[in-house]
Amino acid sequence: MKNERYDLLDGLRGVAALMVLLYHIFNDSKSFFVWPTPVNEFFHSFLGVDFFFILSGFVMGYAYDMQWNRMSLGGFIKRRLIRLHPMVVMGVLVGAVVFIIQGCTKWDGTSVPWQSVLWATLLGLFLIPSPTSMDVRGNTELYPLNGAHWSLFFEYLGSLLYGLMLHRMSTKWLKIWVLLSIVCLAVYAFCQEAGGLLYGWSVEPINMLGGALRMLYAYPMGLLMARLFRERKPSSLQGHVFLKSSIALVVILAMPIIGGKTAETIFQLICNVVFFPAIIWYAARGKATGTKQKVISFLGRLSYPLYAIHFPVICLQISIVQGMGDVYETSAQPWSVVPFSFLISLIIAILAMKYYDEPLRSWLRRKLG
């Protein structure tokens, strides 16, 4: 059952990656050009990152918890580097190329010296957050050449935390950790002026703290779920488990803003604490075979390349629309660039998956063991 379970969970990762792509297409672009009607589509898809974190903790716990008697910390870190870093490199390089195509200027039109672009590229290749002096786009992003990489930074921290500490903790103490982290996350979310959990992408300390709290809850939560799943061995489910899980996830992530600060914060916390764990637990009990399994597996394989490279494509879309000037200020034509961003992101991700990420990771595993 192990492979089927992993296929369904990885397939859901692909669904979440597609929703994050739609979030960035609609909700980031509205800051830079005028839509004919207010844009509120897919707002909660930014919570796909929290879903990724919980899912990563579940997969890490299920895959590695029983291997530490024959696996060193160095071996674990090597596995994570082979899995994650090839697409980090690709995503940074795509971001650098797009930034050069855009003319090496910030969003406000300020020119950026080539030395800053070079330093931002080098820092991004090693997943080192850029200081404000290297903020080539002017948004205070951790990774200005590929803003979505902020969550990969916290993914690395989560993996390191698991390798150093979390895998040694008893289930009892892990439960205490999760409960305390829920309290900390809720207090943080309610205390912010805007409320909610849309934090982690900026080098501003309060923003980075928000990203850290999101990971410090979600990753251990996934690990705890993996342990409980192994202990209880719930029965397998038949039927359209992946379809039902995907619909539930899409409905949640596609929800528009539902109210003011308090309502929004409560909803986002419920998604993290109730909805996402329930979807993962349910999907982990399902099976997939035949053509359905191939489709689900493809979504899983595509998810990480798509997430790693889509953001620069959105930036290119915004730049193109800005260059159109007044043409886009009073018409519905912004909708015409949505398919462009969506399809180009998918095409680049598929090519990267097939001809770069998977072959390179296979080669690295052979060479490094």
Image (spheres, grey):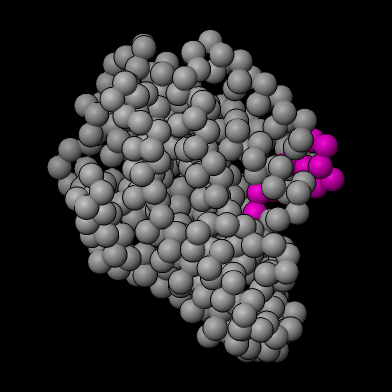
Residue 264 appears left or right of 246: right
Q: Which residues are magenta?
A: 190-201
Answer left or right for 279 relative to 145: left
Q: Quadrant of residue 157?
A: top right
Horizontal and vertical percent position of residue 45: 56, 50
Left or right of 211 on screen, residue 340:
left
Percent of width and height locating residue 336: 52, 78
Residue 277 placed where, x, y %? Answer: 49, 28
Residue occupying image coordinates x 78% and y 42%: 195
Assign the C terminus to one quadrant of the image.
top left
Q: Residue at x 60, y 87 (%)?
A: 103
Residue drawn at x 68%, y 82% as measured from the top left: 112
Count of picture labels: 0
Residue 113 part of the magenta segment: no
Q: Nearer the viewer, residue 2 or 64?
A: 64
In the rendered image, the quadrant that contains the N terminus is top left
Q: Is residue 240 visible?
A: no
Q: Nearer the viewer, residue 33 or 300?
A: 300
Where residue 163 appears, as percent x and y from the top left, is 45, 31
Q: Residue furthest left?
A: 290
Q: Is residue 241 visible?
A: yes
Q: Quadrant of residue 240?
A: top left
Q: Is residue 206 above or below residue 352?
A: above
